[in-house]
Amino acid sequence: MLGAAGIQTAGAAALPLRVTASSFASSPAVVYRALTGCTPAEAQIDDDRAFDRHVLASILSVAVTEPGSITESSGLTADDFAALIVGWFPHVSVLLSVLAVGEHDGDEEAAMVCDLLLKHRSTSGDVGRWLAAMVARRAMQPEHLWEDLGLRSRAELSRLLMRHFEPLARDNTRNMRWKRFFYRKLCEDDGMVMCSTPVCSQCGDFAECFGEESGESRMAIRRREVDLRGTGAA
């Protein structure tokens, strides 16, 4: 298994591999296909293991295309990232290890969300622990959480949370936006009052907490941009 030291060695070893990795990381759709062998639209997620693989691939696919190391953008330590890749996507372990040099700086806000998720875990094993860190880190991004995780819809995010963090997910009885819900729970745990009005329906921020979270996924948008550039070049 590639540990942190192995990742650093691989990263320093060969410039051509880093160039290849950078090209590979230009599109979430390209990364997803390399990880899974299919496009996101073709993903079959009927059973839990297939769904977990789809979720992990989706998160990695958007995280790897962002600036900096994938450990920073995914929220994983170098050792956890290596374990995830070797365990779930070993065929690209050498390539992705080049992009994972170094550890990311801890973010206090992400750590609080991660702790909240871990406190409500409903599955055992590494996947739930990894996902707590990954969901927490991606929650720091600006879009809807399902988009920042590279998922195809909010329904997939809800399924992820119900599967791995069921006690917390079941507490979202009014279908609040998940980022808002996380922060509301953190405030409640600290004995704080986050909202200015006691009744949600009377609040001026109602749409921010409960508004629709539909739309086209980031992966689909990126795929269309790449196709358009290809058409223009032709």
Image: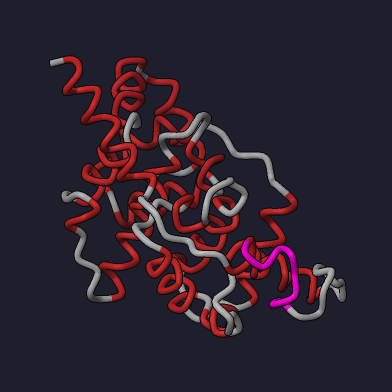
Which residue occupies the foreground of this view, 95 or 160? 160
Q: Is residue 222 above or below residue 127?
A: above
Residue at (56% x, 40% y) in the render: 72
From the image, which quarter does the C terminus lie in?
top left
Is residue 203 magenta-colored? Answer: yes
| Residues in magenta, as a range | 200-207
Question: Taking 184 as reference, is 17 above or below it?
Answer: above
Residue drawn at 67 percent across, 68 percent down: 206
Q: Is residue 51 above or below residue 20?
A: below
Would you say residue 104 sits in the magenta stretch?
no
Residue 24 vs residue 208: left or right? left
Lateral position of residue 99 relative to residue 47, left or right: right
Residue at 55% x, 84% y: name it: 170
Residue 105 in the figure: left or right of residue 73: right
- Figure quadrant of residue 209: bottom right
Q: Colour scheme of this structure image? A: secondary structure
Image position of 198 with respect to 69: above or below: below
Residue furthest to the left: 234
Name the residue rendered at 40%, 28% in the picture.
Answer: 10
Residue nearest the observer in this picture, 191 or 35: 191
Exactly how many numbered labels are in the figure? 0
Q: Nearer the viewer, residue 175 or 151?
A: 175
Looking at the picture, how far across and down is residue 136, in whole percent?
59, 57
Main secondary-structure element of the magenta-colored stretch? helix
Horizontal placement of 117 versus 123: left or right?
right
Question: In x, y percent, where is residue 74?
Answer: 51, 47
Q: Position of residue 42 (x, y in %)?
A: 17, 57
